[in-house]
Amino acid sequence: MKFTTTTAFTASLLAAGAMGFHPAAVPEDDPSEITLTGVVRDFKERTAEDGHTDFERRPNRGFGLYCGNVAAELDSDGKPVFSGEGFKVGYQWRNSNGQNICWRLFDSSLGDTAGSQGATDTGGIQDDESFRLWYRDDPRINKSKLLELTLNRQADGSYVFDSDVDAMSVERGGFFPVDHELFGNSGGAGPDHNYHFTFELQTEFTYEADGAQVFTFRGDDDVWVYINRQLVIDLGGVHGALDQTVDLNRLDLEDGEVYELSFFFAERHRTASNFRMTTNLKLRNIELPTVTAAYD
């Protein structure tokens, strides 16, 4: 499978992720793939005319993982909110299986290992006004289009997309879904790509208390995941590929109830872009948003 570009693109994985969950045999009625539609928003870097100040912005304390710069809960529009209370991370918090987890979910009674919280820093985000534009359409600063992401079912029951093995991503040298589109490629040093964009998914799923349900992401740069409007993955900052996993049994959810999973990604810096999503959740889109490309 591969992804193709029309008004959207479809991405598929050829191999499973290996992020530590081992679900039971796959029921025959499980779908062979899950296709989700989100929004990619393209920006110009901060030094370009009409550029966005947060793209190609080096954090004051250098590149790396920064946590705590978004609020624990989504706002009334279902978007993340900049808090400016972040910190640089020396090493991540981990569960008893050695998997990286969100610092907010740390629980020593479950055998978790504490991470290293460093000095306060915004992780290369100027302020709440600049951050607000990351996941909202504004013709003064960004262009948007729909983006389809297809996750293929693996033998272990997981659904995965991995830019390291996806044919089109390999051809492009990474996760660059809007190369030569919207504002076009970024130019400058390094390989010729469109490096400055965000991606948002709004989905839902049914929680199964005995389903050993997990969600894992590995990539760069910023990634935030919210379940039931609460932050469960926090990979902020300009950094290389990093991962976190959330075990849904930690989240005090009700068996059989439907919950939302909101996913927010940003690529802000040359010269690489990586994207791997692994989950055994049966994610479904909530609604298709309007995008600026529909009117071009």
Image (cartoon, rainbow, N blue to C red):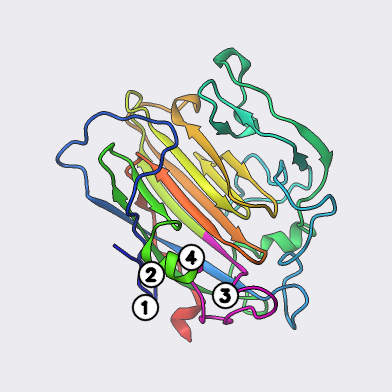
Q: Which residue is mark 3?
A: 193
Tell me: residue 13, above or below residue 191: above
Q: Secondary structure at mark 3?
A: loop
Q: Type of residue at label 1?
A: Thr
Q: Type of residue at label 4?
A: Val
The quarter of the picture where residue 35 lies is bottom left
Judged left or right of residue 101, residue 153 is left
Tell me: residue 37, above or below residue 116: below
- Circles 2 and 1, Cβ within 8 Å, touching? The answer is yes
Measured Cα–Cα span from mark 1 to mark 3? 18 Å
- Circles 2 and 4, Cβ within 8 Å, touching? The answer is no
Of circles 2 and 3, the one toward us is 3
Measured Cα–Cα span from mark 2 to mark 1? 6 Å
Image point (47%, 84%), residue name: 295
Name, please, the residue furthest toward the bottom.
296
| Label number found at residue 39 | 4
Q: Earlier in the sequence, mark 2 or mark 3?
A: 2
- Circles 2 and 3, Cβ within 8 Å, touching? The answer is no
Q: Magenta region, mostly helix, strand or loop?
A: loop
What stretch of residues is rendered in magenta? 174-199
Q: Type of residue at label 3?
A: His
